[in-house]
Image: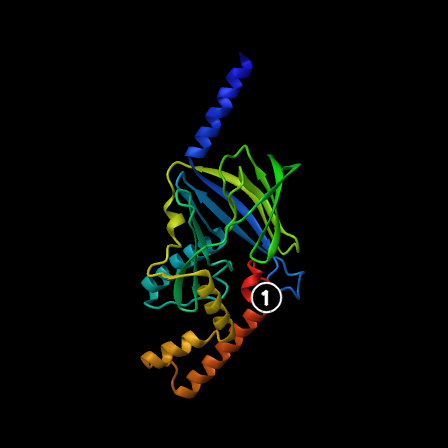
């Protein structure tokens, strides 16, 4: 009798959990510059799930942008002008990933230069599940491996959380991914907390990008490589098309500004050589 009761109770909890809107908060540690592996960056990421789909985005970036927006609005109201401080914006992850549980679509939403794009993922992740078990935090997990985007990955998933999802584009295991790491130890996600959401909070829609340009994976790769070779192209195009001189007194100052901006962008890109999808650079 007791066994039946607990079995029904567990089944009820599983059904309740899978039917709810959940927020899974991951700590993401990554090495963006392969020549400086001691520089490990950390970002907090949210995976917000509903019965129909999920959205994965940077909580660090979202919170920073929200605080900066409030500050700029206060400045504008008080002084009629704004002053953007360089230390105001935190977080380097600016993309979002939306998964549709109904049709299996995975949409990668990002910007290159001044334009917003939506790239539908067309590669399937094939998992190999092992009998290995490990307790991570409060979760009992099982091992699985896969190859994706030029990297070999090891995942630890929890079948007690009946949501076949995980960080970034990863999904398809019989339970939520608790921990995920590539074999070079460059990218590591680990679940830190879970929050029930009665109804999805408005903040998860903060990264919705209007007027996104749809791209295929091959088109996105080509565009990304072109941008990395010439990161200031978009700024120059705006200046040429609109006669913009970026509030400089003369064209010489404008040219100097553009050159300095281009050098900074190229230096940033040079240090961003260890992408999570490393095959984008090949």
Query: Where does the image place residue 12, in percent across and percent down from the top left?
Result: 46, 25
Count how many numbered circles sit on residues in the image.
Answer: 1
Q: Is residue 209 left or right of residue 17?
A: left
Q: Nearer the viewer, residue 44 or 180?
A: 180
Q: Is residue 11 above or below residue 33?
A: above
Q: Quadrant of the C terminus?
A: bottom right
Question: Residue 155 at x, y = what percent?
Answer: 60, 45
Please tell me which residue is depicted at 50% across the width and 40% down the height of the picture.
Answer: 164
Q: Which residue sits at x=46%, y=66%?
A: 85
- Horizontal side of residue 199 vs 258, given as left or right: left
Which residue sits at x=43%, y=60%?
110
Q: How is the image coloured?
A: rainbow
Residue 137 in sight from this viewpoint = no
Please tell me which residue lies in front, 40 or 223.
Answer: 223
Q: Is residue 211 above or below residue 1?
A: below
Spot occupied by residue 44 in the image (x, y as percentages of width and height): 53, 50
Which quadrant of the view contains residue 69?
bottom left
Q: For mark 1, does the 10 Å Cα neighbourhood hold few (<14), some (14 to 19), or many (20 or more) residues?
A: some
The quadrant where residue 16 appears: top left
Instruction: State the image coordinates of residue 133 (x, y, percent, origin top left).
Output: 65, 36
- Name the residue that disc number 1 marks: 273
Q: For this view, does 80 lie left or right of residue 141?
A: left
Camera-side residue of 85 and 136:
136
Residue 52 visible here: yes
Q: Residue furthest top?
A: 1
Q: Secondary structure at mark 1?
A: loop
């Amino acid at each position: 009798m007791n066994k039946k009761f607990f079995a029904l109770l567990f089944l009820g909890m599983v059904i309740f959990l899978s039917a709810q809107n959940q927020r899974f908060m991951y700590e993401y540690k990554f090495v963006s510059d392969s020549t400086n592996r001691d520089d490990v960056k950390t970002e907090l990421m949210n995976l917000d799930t509903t019965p129909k789909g999920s959205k994965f985005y940077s909580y660090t970036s979202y919170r920073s942008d929200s605080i900066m927006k409030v500050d700029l609005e206060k400045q504008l109201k008080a002084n009629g002008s704004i002053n953007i401080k360089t230390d105001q914006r935190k977080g380097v992850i600016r993309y979002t990933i939306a998964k549709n549980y109904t049709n299996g679509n995975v949409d990668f939403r990002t910007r290159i230069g001044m334009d917003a794009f939506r790239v539908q993922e067309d590669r399937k992740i094939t998992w190999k599940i092992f009998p290995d078990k490990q307790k991570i935090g409060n979760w009992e997990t099982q091992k699985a491996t896969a190859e994706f985007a030029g990297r070999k990955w090891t995942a630890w998933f929890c079948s007690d959380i009946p949501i076949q999802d995980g960080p970034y584009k990863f999904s398809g295991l019989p339970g939520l991914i608790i921990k995920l790491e590539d074999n070079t130890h460059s990218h590591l996600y680990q679940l830190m907390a879970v929050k029930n959401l009665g109804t999805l909070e408005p903040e998860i829609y903060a990264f919705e990008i209007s007027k996104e340009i749809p791209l295929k994976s091959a088109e996105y790769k080509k565009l990304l490589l072109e941008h990395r070779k010439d990161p200031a192209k978009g700024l120059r195009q705006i200046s040429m098309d609109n006669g913009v001189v970026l509030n400089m007194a003369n064209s010489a100052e404008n040219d100097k500004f553009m050159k300095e901006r281009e050098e900074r962008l190229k230096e940033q890109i040079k240090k961003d050589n260890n992408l999570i999808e490393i095959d984008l650079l090949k």
